[in-house]
Image (cartoon, rainbow, N blue to C red):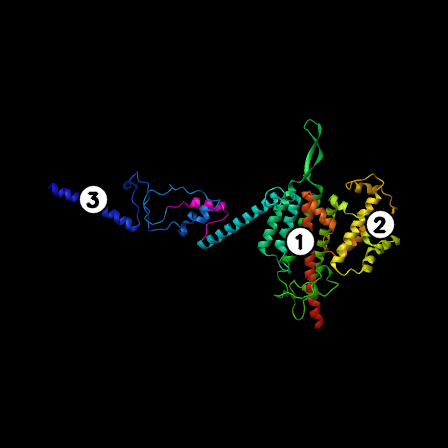
Amino acid sequence: MAICRVESCNLGKMENLSNSDENYDLGYQPSPSFVDQNDQSIPETPGYSTLSGESFVYGRTCSETSAFSDPIDDHSCCSEASPSHWPPTRSMAQKQAVLSRLGTKQRGSNEDEKQLDYLESLELELEMMKERFAKLLLGEDMSGSGKGVCTAVTISNAITNLYATVFGQNLRLEPLNPEKKALWKREMDCLLSVCDYIVEFTSKSQNLSNGTALEVMKSRPRSDIYVNLPALRKLDAMLIEILDSFEDREFWYAEDGSVSSNSSRTGSFRRVVKRNDEKWWVPVPCVPPCGLSEKARKHLRHKRDCANQIHKAAMAINSGVLAEMEIPDSYVASLPKSGRASIGESIYRFMLGTEKFCPDYLLDCLSIASEHEALELADNVEASMYTWRRKACIKHSKPSWGMVKVLMSDVDLSDKNHILAERAESLLFALKQRYPELSQTSLDTCKIQHNRDVGQAILESYSRVLEGLAFNIVAWIEDVFFVDRAVTSQE
């Protein structure tokens, strides 16, 4: 009887062991009571994969590379067997908490993949912003030796380069690409945020509860930024709105531009030469065989007038900011001793010999044929203007250029140097009005390179790029009208 009891007991233990083996084969995990407490190894369970789509919070993209995910606890596994073969995962509340921090909701697997791609694009944009922020701090000197340009010049270059990145390849009357539009808005907001901390202090009267009047200092945005920056933001939004208005249009563009070997002239002189010879790189607009409808022409004329007004406003702001910048000493040292020798004998006699000076008539007599000639004339006239202004203030012993504006108010208005300086200024203004896309003069370039005022650098570069965009929109609309007139004349 004892032998039978031992055998039956051994048979029971063997059945328990076989059942345990069957549980492993079916993917079950043993209860913690069967696991040795000193054994820290975890048995492999081939019945599931830890990269299952339903448990994507454990995937590399969300848990290991994302900075927003919660750390995963290696000891958070459930202690009991999971008969449905799922791996140990977080609760739904934890999933929703992670997704809510990412600004998303739990969706299907396809939308989860889209969301992961979106997060990867955000990570790339963040790295790009870090790179540009580092360049701003280093002054574009990647060696870190402190030989970079000043902060004002760096921000000015950043705005100019951003404009070239967003609008450089946009040569058509069509809405801006949504990605580029978002890039322009996001990075411009970042660059313009510097102006929020450029303030000036003013005194303000404050009455206490006991009736005592105190004078306290209160900060406010600097006057030039307070006036010009909101206006530039408004002009920026209006230009984007003009481009967006051409989503549904009657004209279109050819795939290949009008290529010509004689392309020595730029868009500033489109009235002097033929269109095919001057803008070979610009896509050629095409219109229907019968031409544009009257509604489309009215829309184009309205947008052209709006863009033209925006161009004038941005140009006025840019000229005002440049006028307020200090004249570098290097430019003063390069001024000619005689303004008469700088502008030439014929122009000097015309400016001095007439009682009533007309700059437009003088420009018509000069017959400027290229942008190079116009820019050379602008440099000479500007240099002569400052030479005559310096001579008009010569009665003050060696005045600094910071005092020239103050001293000019005390100058005799009948003085010959003062009259020549005023007429040179009007001639320079008329020249810039006639050729609005004229490159910057030597003085403007020198001012921008040596400027140390961050606020003026932002206002100048922002107004300059908006001025260029407005001029391009006007030129593109003129191209459409040019093709429309050519088609209708053939009919």
Place residue 90 in its image quadrant.
top left
Q: What residue did someone put label 2 on? A: 420
**Image mark for residue 13:** 3
SS for dot 1:
helix
Whether residue 101 appears in magenta in the rendering, the answer is yes
* Dot 3 alpha-carbon crowd within 10 angstroms: few under 14, some 14 to 19, many 20 or more: few
Q: Residue 16 in the image: state x and y as whole percent.
A: 22, 45
Tag 2 secondary structure: helix
Answer with mark 3 or mark 1, whichever residue precedes in sequence: 3
User: The disc labelled 2 sits on which kind of residue?
Assistant: Leu
The answer to which of 120 and 327 lies nearer the viewer is 327
Label 3 is placed on what type of residue?
Lys
- Res. 449 mark: none
Residue behind mark 1: 238
Point 69% across, 42% down: residue:
453
Q: Would you say 215 lies left or right of 40 here?
A: right
Q: Is residue 465 above or below residue 369?
A: above
**Chain-order first, disc 1 or disc 2:** 1
Which residues fall within the magenta stretch? 88-107
The image quarter containing residue 206 is top right
As rendered, which of 238 and 400 lies closer to the eye?
A: 400
Residue 435: say if magenta: no
Q: Could you tell me residue 97's position as x and y percent?
A: 46, 44
Quadrant location of the C terminus in the rendered image: bottom right
Tag nearer the camera, 1 or 2 = 2
